[in-house]
Image (tube, rainbow, N blue to C red):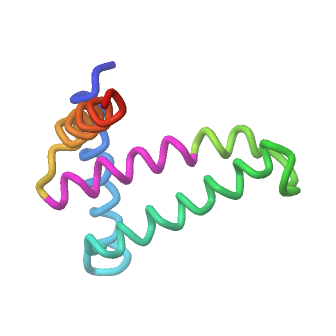
Amino acid sequence: MNFSDIAERSIQLRKAYHRLERQYHESEWTVEEDALAFLTDAGLVGRLTMSQQKRWPISGGSETNLEHKIGECMWWLIVLAERMDIDSGEALEKFLTKTEAKLKE
């Protein structure tokens, strides 16, 4: 699957969550709330990584949870970029190009 397909699926999934938010809370999460949710999940990636590397004890399923949380963090970044009018694919391409050039110096 190419990146633009992944981005589109991510946006559609976020729209489905927005419908649930309106249903249960009468409003959609703000961009700031989405960013906080991403940071929470990113923190969990850190903790699950420590568990996977045998540096922090977590009982049960840390490998499965780690894979899920990494995917979820990628999803959040795509969602956040879209909500702030940033093309996530273009942002990644620019970052890679700029960083590769710096490392060649």
Q: Residue furthest top?
A: 1
Q: 25 or 50: nearer the eye?
A: 50
Say which residue appears at 35% left-offset and 65% top-offset: 20
Quadrant in which the C terminus appears: top left
On screen, residue 50 above or below 40: above
Magenta span: 69-84
Residue 73 among magenta residues: yes
The chief SS type of the magenta part is helix
Residue 25 occupies quadrant: bottom left
- Horizontally, residue 20 falls left or right of residue 8, namely right
Q: 33 or 89: nearer the eye?
A: 89
Position of residue 18 measured from the top left corner of the image (x, y, whole percent): 28, 63
On screen, residue 91 above or below 33: above
Position of residue 15 measured from the top left corner of the image (x, y, whole percent): 25, 54
Residue 26 among magenta residues: no
On screen, residue 13 above or below 47: above
On screen, residue 36 above or below 86: below
Q: Residue furthest bottom?
A: 26
Residue 70 occupies quadrant: top right
Q: Residue furthest front?
A: 105
- Horizontally, residue 98 falls left or right of residue 41, namely left
Quadrant in which the N terminus appears: top left
Residue 47 occupies quadrant: bottom right
Say which residue appears at 84% left-offset and 52% top-offset: 55
Say which residue appears at 67% left-offset and 45% top-offset: 65
Position of residue 62 measured from the top left corner of the image (x, y, whole percent): 76, 45
Position of residue 68 measured from the top left corner of the image (x, y, whole percent): 58, 42
